[in-house]
Amino acid sequence: MSDLLDKIEKDILKLNNQERTFLADRLLGLLDGDLISDIDQAWIVEAERRYHGYKNGERSGVDAQDVFLEKESAKRL
């Protein structure tokens, strides 16, 4: 493996799981455009926008329990 690839691998291992997932999706998209649809890509961009907004204090988080309660309420309708 080249020195550059070694450095990239070490840097990637410093990322959290969510960041690595986004990176993996982008890299796979470069290999074959059919792996990530336009809709998937739009959701990735939106998720990144929301995540960065949260990290920068522009958005507040939602408690997971509240999300699950809302989902259960919607099922009953």
Image (cartoon, grey):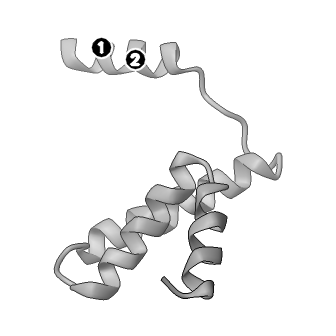
Instruction: Identify which residue is drawn at 72% across, 46% down.
Output: 54
Task: Please identify the quarter of the rendering in which residue 42 is found.
Answer: bottom left
Q: Is residue 65 above or below residue 2?
A: above
**Which residue is under mark 1?**
72
Locate residue 38, reporting x and y percent: 28, 77
Q: What is the x, y in percent for residue 29? A: 31, 80
Residue 32 in which image quadrant: bottom left
Q: Residue at x 61, y 86 (%)?
A: 4
Is 5 on the left-hand or right-hand side of 74?
right
Q: Relative to 25, is 60 above or below?
A: above
The answer to whether residue 41 shows anywhere in this view is yes
Q: Quadrant of the C terminus?
A: top left
Q: Residues within 10 Å of mark 1 (few under 14, many from 20)?
A: few
Q: Secondary structure at mark 1?
A: helix
Query: Decide: marks 2, 1 in contact (CB < 8 A)?
Result: yes
Asked if 50 appears above or below 69 in the picture, the reply is below
Distance between mark 2 and mark 1 Cα atoms: 6 Å
Which numbered tag is attached to residue 68?
2
Q: Amino acid at mark 1?
A: Glu
Residue sitting at 66 percent across and 33 percent down?
61
- Residue at far right of view: 57
